[in-house]
Amino acid sequence: GSCIYTESKQDCLQCRVFQMINGDGPTMNAIFRLFHSMKGSAGFLELNHITRAAHTAENLLDLIRNGGVRMEAEHVNLLCSACDFAKDALDFVDANFSDEGMAEDAEKISSRLEAAISEAKQSAAEQPGACPPAPQQEAPPADTQEAQDEEVLDFELNITPEMLEKFVQEADELLQNAEQDLLKWEEIRDNPD
């Protein structure tokens, strides 16, 4: 369906009603970029559990900021939980130079986020008048992806403690900003005037 308040997808994303429900664009983009940056950096540093949790949070945020689903209070709580997980994981990485001890916690938060994504998509499909989701980009053909993966395997990175320390510092700053933005969204939603 299309947005009941506007004529186009672009107008929908700028609509005051959409922004009250899903947060203003700059705030949502900032939170999205936090998880996107964390996912990329953690992936580069082979911190696979942080990468998975950040990727799942990023997926939920992408659906919200593109109007595919409505932002709910439950989503804010989950995203704050994802920030809490990330802080704990960063502390673990700082002490152990690995995120291997965070596998169970990463699985828990990722599963909760995946469930929220599925529920939100189902709810959006059942409710007419929501903004249409953004078109999905097609994945590259499997043979192209395999060739790219093989090229990556030829490169070996020596991850230093300094690299991990820098990641922890930068991610911690980003997490603090994201939590402030999430709390601001919740306050605006509860007190729109």
Image (tube, helix red, strand yellow):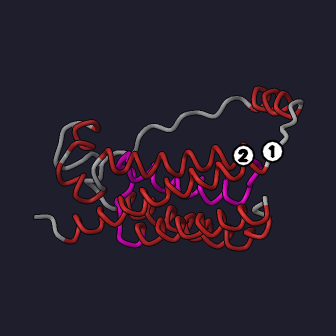
Residue nearer the viewer, 79 or 34: 34
From this view, report whether residue 76 is shown above or below residue 6: below
Report the disc number at residue 163: 2
How many residues crowd mark 1 within 10 Å: few (<14), some (14–19), many (20+)?
few
From this view, report whether residue 84 is shown above or below residue 138: below
Question: Disc 1 designates what residue?
Answer: 159
The verdict on residue 71 being magenta is: yes
From this view, report whether residue 114 is shown above or below residue 36: below
Q: In which quadrant is the C terminus drawn?
A: bottom left
Residue 28 x, y percent position in the rendering: 37, 50
Residue at image point 72% right, 62% down: 93
Residue 146 x, y percent position in the rendering: 81, 32
Report the disc number at residue 169: none
The verdict on residue 44 being magenta is: no
Q: Which residues are magenta?
A: 45-74
* Tag 1 near tag 2, CB within 8 Å: yes
Which secondary structure is most common in the magenta stretch?
A: helix
Q: Mark 1 belongs to which amino acid?
A: Ile
Residue farthest front in this picture: 162
Residue nearer the viewer, 52 or 41: 41
Residue at image point 78% right, 70% down: 101
Residue at image point 54% right, 34% down: 137
